[in-house]
Image (tube, helix red, strand yellow):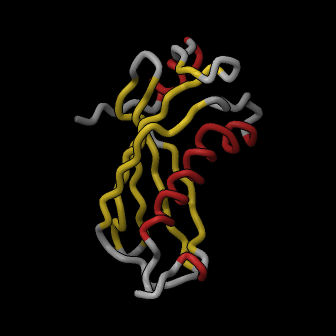
Amino acid sequence: MRHKTTIYVRWNDHDMFGHVNNANYLTYMQETRADFTWYSRIRRGLEPVFKDMVVASAHVDFLIPIYEAGFELDVEIWVAKIGNASFDLMYELSSKDGLHARGRTTQVTVDMETKKSRRLKDNERAILTEYLEETP
């Protein structure tokens, strides 16, 4: 299963080349991740999860540039891998024009008192498993 959301491309997301700046794709991925773990759960009357995670790595493949603003971007997110204290999320950012980018991030869960990584809780693992599509 995949979580889907829509991101609005703002006019100030563009750079001097007239397309969306590469750094903004990471922001789109972050907004999607926040919707997946927080806002969509609140809308469904569920407890948000992963308030205590950090991004350990991020990768983006840019496929089709976005040249316009006031543009809606459809983003899908799913779980590619579940470890002991970390998990990988995959992203596809697309529109009527096609697939604009693919991304992957690795999140690490953190104990907020010690500021060190912690093991995934059973309920967190269960939520992640619902969205698991193992990807090499």
Task: Residue 130: give x, y in percent of width and height.
Answer: 47, 27
Residue displayed at 52% across by 17% down: 120
Most extreme residue toward the left, as rendered?
136
Query: How many tags in the picture?
Result: 0
Residue displayed at 55% across by 25% down: 109
Q: Check the image and report above or below for 62 versus 15.
A: above
Q: Check the image and report above or below for 19 versus 132.
A: below
Quadrant for residue 37, please give it.
top right
Task: Residue 105: give x, y in percent of width and height.
Answer: 42, 42
Task: Residue 28: give x, y in percent of width and height.
Answer: 53, 59
Front residue (pair 68, 13): 13
Quadrant (top left, top right, bottom left, bottom right) of the C terminus: top left
Quadrant (top left, top right, bottom left, bottom right) of the N terminus: top left
Residue displayed at 41% across by 74% down: 96
Left of 35 or right of it: where is 66?
A: left
Front residue (pair 7, 112): 112
Q: Check the image and report above or below for 133 versus 2.
A: above
Task: Residue 65: give x, y in percent of width and height.
Answer: 36, 76
Left of 11 or right of it: where is 64?
A: left
Residue displayed at 58% across by 24% down: 110
